[in-house]
Image: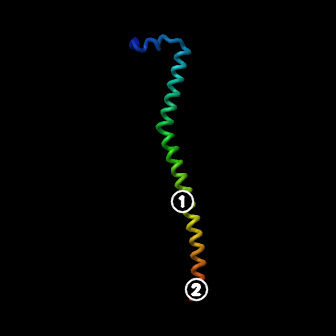
Amino acid sequence: MAAPAFLEPMVNAPKWQKALFGLIGLVAIGVAAYMLLLSPLHTRVTALRAQHAQLERDIAQQNVILADLARFRSLVAEVE
């Protein structure tokens, strides 16, 4: 079976050129996989880490308020 006319230069190319084209194809597939699969996940992980840090700051702030509440309740008990 003969190759189509537009593929004839590739079929008749030297071995090193075929290997180079194959390597370029693999790199293109790798870049496409990163851009389509890993890059959005990296963005999501970064956003979730920022949200986690914010929640930890909120928890620390709530713990301070809780400690003040216990102190305030003891003061109210003394006043009563």
Residue tagged 1: 55
Quick check: marks 2 and 1 in contact, CB under 8 Å? no
Report the amino acid beneath label 2: Ala
Q: Nearer the viewer, residue 66 or 10?
A: 66
Provide residue 1's location: percent of width, then percent of height: 39, 12
Q: Is residue 1 visible?
A: no
User: Which quadrant of the structure image shows residue 62?
Assistant: bottom right
How many marks do you count on the picture?
2
Placement of 2 over or under 44, stated as above or below? above
Residue drawn at (50%, 12%) of the image: 13
Dividing the image into 4 quarters, which one contains the C terminus?
A: bottom right
Provide residue 73's location: percent of width, then percent of height: 57, 80
Provide residue 63's location: percent of width, then percent of height: 58, 68
Element marked by disc 1: helix
Q: Earlier in the sequence, mark 2 or mark 1?
A: 1
Report the amino acid beneath label 1: Leu
Q: Residues within 10 Å of mark 1 (few under 14, many from 20)?
A: few
Residue tagged 2: 77
Provide residue 56's location: percent of width, then percent of height: 57, 60
Q: Is residue 64 visible?
A: yes
Placement of 67 over or under 1, stated as above or below? below
